[in-house]
């Protein structure tokens, strides 16, 4: 314990950085735990969608979608969600929907918007299509 105090006295700047990082980690963890948005790993998302006759909704651009997407997913770019053009997924209002983007970050705002529009079971594919590919899960390409 004495060594820790000596280190802090000798390195106040580095110790301060460590404290700030620790606080940031705690705040991020608490926010994540308190968030109403469900984050699913690829395998969890597949089971969730299959059990509830749901769908993967890919919010990336049409070009990105064509380069590779989850088989059976619906392409609904984020711009259309913002404009409330949701007819392509209207039938899934009560079914599980997993939002897919490139890394899982943009999908959170799509979840908020879809929830506000009355979609009851919406989650994020954690890590997005990049995590899906890393898990060596199949990707379809549209030409």
Image (cartoon, rainbow, N blue to C red):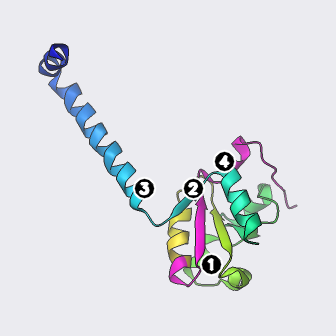
Label 2 – label 1 distance at C-alpha? 18 Å
Identify the disc placed on residue 104: 2
63 displayed left or right of 27? right
Taking the spot 62% from the left edge, 78% from the top edge, the residue there is 80
Which mark is drawn over residue 32?
3
Q: Earlier in the sequence, mark 2 or mark 1?
A: 1
Between disc 4 and disc 2, whose residue precedes?
A: 2
Q: Nearer the viewer, mark 2 or mark 1?
A: 2
- Mark identifier at residue 80: 1
Task: State the image coordinates of residue 3 (x, y, percent, origin top left).
Answer: 18, 13
Depth order, front residue of 35/107: 35
Please tell me how crowded label 4 is: few (under 14), some (14-19), or many (20+) other residues with Cα within 10 Å: some
Using a 10 Å C-alpha cutoff, classify the residue at mark 2 as few (fewer than 14 neighbours), some (14 to 19) or many (20 or more).
Answer: some
Determine whether label 1 and label 4 are within 8 Å by CB.
Answer: no
Q: CA distance from mark 1 to mark 3?
A: 27 Å
| Label 1 Cα neighbours within 10 Å, binned few <14 / some 14-19 / many ≥20 | few
Mark found first going from the N terminus, 1 or 4: 1
Q: Are marks 2 and 1 in contact (CB under 8 Å)?
A: no
Q: Which residues are magenta?
A: 115-143
Q: Position of residue 33 (x, y in %)?
A: 42, 56
Percent coordinates x, y for residue 62 in the rendering: 73, 66
Q: Is residue 127 magenta?
A: yes
* Left/right of residue 31 with respect to residue 139 in the rendered view: left
Disc 1 or 3, which lies upstream in sequence? 3
Checking the image for residue 23, the label placed there is none
**SS at badge 2:** loop
Q: Residue 125 lies in what quarter of the image?
A: bottom right
Residue drawn 14% across and 19% down?
Answer: 5
Is residue 59 visible from the viewing direction of this image?
no
- The circle drawn on residue 130 is 4
Depth check, mark 2 against mark 3: the one in front is 3
CA neighbours of label 3 inside 10 A, class few (<14), some (14 to 19), many (20+)? few
């Amino acid at each position: 314990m004495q060594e820790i105090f000596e280190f802090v006295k000798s390195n106040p700047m580095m110790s301060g950085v460590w404290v700030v990082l620790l606080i940031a980690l705690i705040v991020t963890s608490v926010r994540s735990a308190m968030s109403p948005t469900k984050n699913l790993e690829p395998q969890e998302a597949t089971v969730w969608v299959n059990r509830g006759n749901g769908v993967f909704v890919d919010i990336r651009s049409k070009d990105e979608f064509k380069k590779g997407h989850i088989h059976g997913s619906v392409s609904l770019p984020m711009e259309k969600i913002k404009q409330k053009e949701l007819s392509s997924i209207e039938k899934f209002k009560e079914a599980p929907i997993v939002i897919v983007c490139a890394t899982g970050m943009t999908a959170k705002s799509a979840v908020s918007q879809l929830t506000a529009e009355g979609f009851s079971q919406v989650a994020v594919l954690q890590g997005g299509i990049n995590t899906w590919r890393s898990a060596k899960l199949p990707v379809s390409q549209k030409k």
